[in-house]
Image (cartoon, rainbow, N blue to C red):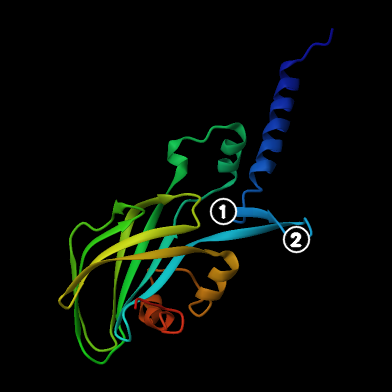
Amino acid sequence: MSVVTFPHRCLVAALLLISVWCSGCGQGVQGRMASTKYDETGQPVTVVYSDIYEARKLLVPNRFGVALLVRDKKIVNAWYGIKQTLGWLGPDDSESPAECLIAVFNRSDKPIKVTLREAQLNNRDILRSPERWNLSGMETMRLLLRDLKIPSYGTEIACQLHLKIEEIDAVHTVTLRRFTEDEADEYFKKWEHRDTNSDEFFAEVAEATDSERAESSH
């Protein structure tokens, strides 16, 4: 009869932990969400998603629109992979802390008055009080909302904006799509970073909402 000594048990436990750790290290790149699908030849193709969701929409053609960015701030490290492998994930792991940038832009030469009455992200209220803007011609203003919660593994987020634009009061739905890592690199390369708090980013956000990519709301 073989006897398993305490050092042997420690060695077995250490090897098991290393094995699970290596398994956990395969959770995307730098903690990003990854999805593997099979192409027409049957070969696996892995798409790595970024931490950024984005959408743009013209709400008044040739005059007023919004640009939205949501950042998933959860750090999915190797320990998360270990928890997933061992079945230790809890309810809190299904949600991620997030922040949302709402940029409103006037594309005309005439001033425009806008009030954001309510805002929801995935049917959750994210605005504590109404925001009012008096936009001069070609002006962009922004609002950064912090301490939000979003699903950890989504690829789209629905946002409802209750806006009063001049005298027109309406609720607008905008769907944000999650960038892949390649798309995010392309989107942010002009700023050479992903710091949505930087003045340079906000100063140029209007340029990113060009009419060629914005969706008209006819």
Q: Residue 54 placed where, x, y %?
A: 44, 67
Q: Residue 115 placed where, x, y %?
A: 19, 71
User: Of circles 2 and 1, which is in front?
Assistant: 2
Q: Is residue 179 above or below residue 120?
A: below
Q: Which residue sits at x=40%, y=69%?
A: 196
Q: Which residue sits at x=59%, y=55%?
A: 30
Q: Which residue sits at x=15%, y=76%?
A: 167
Q: Residue 165 placed where, x, y %?
A: 20, 75
Q: Which of 70 and 45 lies nearest the eye of the viewer? A: 45
Q: Earlier in the sequence, mark 2 or mark 1?
A: 1
Q: Is residue 16 above or below residue 67?
A: above
Question: Left or right of 216: which side holds 49?
Answer: right
Which quadrant would residue 166 be assigned to in this image? bottom left
Total residue callouts? 2
Name the quadrant of the C terminus: bottom left
Q: Residue 203 placed where, x, y %?
A: 36, 81
Q: Which of 49 and 188 lies nearest the eye of the viewer? A: 49
Instruction: Check disc 1 and report the residue beneath it.
Output: 33
Q: Which residue sits at x=47%, y=41%?
A: 93
Instruction: Check disc 2 and report the residue beneath it.
Output: 40
Q: Amino acid at mark 2?
A: Glu
